[in-house]
Amino acid sequence: SVTERSCSTLVRASTLELQCQARKDRIEFLEKALDVNRQLMTKEAKQAAKIEKKLKVILGGYQAKAMALCKQIEEINDQLDTVSVENVTYSKLRETEQSIIPYRLQKLQEHLLRQSDREKGLQEKFKYLLDQRKELTIEMAKLGISPL
């Protein structure tokens, strides 16, 4: 850059002059060179600050968008983790339920059979009691006793 060229030119020229000058002159020359370098450095620092400010304005919107997108990515990753855990959980639950279905069917069939046998027995008992009632009613009529 301009500063580097200026400095290198200044250093080359100063090297020749330093060899010829007295110590006091050398000190003065080096002080001036230092001042020139400081001024150049200050000027470049100001330019860099201006450029950084412009970049901050230009890139600020992009940085805000990037941060918002990063946040969305994190939220989606969290949701993905949750859904993944739920998927594993429900898959295991499904496997468990699938394996227990035959057992449950067997128990229901056994219960149905018991209930059918019980109902059949109760129906037979009811028929027997109806027949007995009928017989007792006939006997009561033969004896002249009126039914209640």
Image: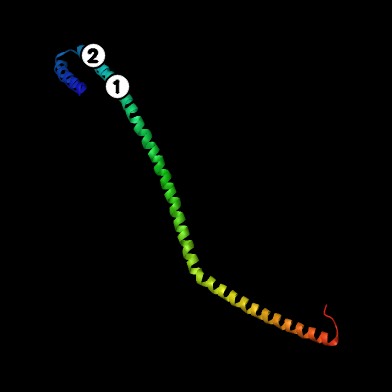
* Badge 1: residue crowd in 10 Å (few <14, some 14–19, many ≥20): few
Above or below residue 31? Residue 77 is below
Residue 58 badge: none
In what quadrant of the picture does the C terminus appear? bottom right
Q: Position of residue 100 (x, y in %)?
A: 51, 69
Q: Amino acid at mark 1?
A: Ala
| Circle 2 SS class | helix
Q: Residue at the spot x=21%, y=21% of the render?
A: 3
- Left or right: where 29 falls relative to 135: left
Q: Position of residue 28 (x, y in %)?
A: 23, 12
Q: Quote the CA–CA distance across marks 2 and 1.
A: 20 Å
| Circle 1 SS class | helix
Front in this rendered view, residue 38 or 112: 112
Above or below residue 76? Residue 10 is above
User: Which comes sooner in the sequence, label 2 or label 1?
Assistant: 2
Front in this rendered view, residue 138 or 19: 138
Q: Which residue is mark 2?
A: 32
**Of discs 2 and 1, which sits in the foreground?**
1
Residue contact between numbered discs 2 and 1, judged by CB atoms under 8 Å: no
In the figure, residue 140 lies in which quadrant? bottom right
In what quadrant of the picture does the N terminus appear? top left
Front in this rendered view, residue 6 or 142: 142
Above or below residue 132? Residue 96 is above
Q: Which residue is mark 1?
A: 45
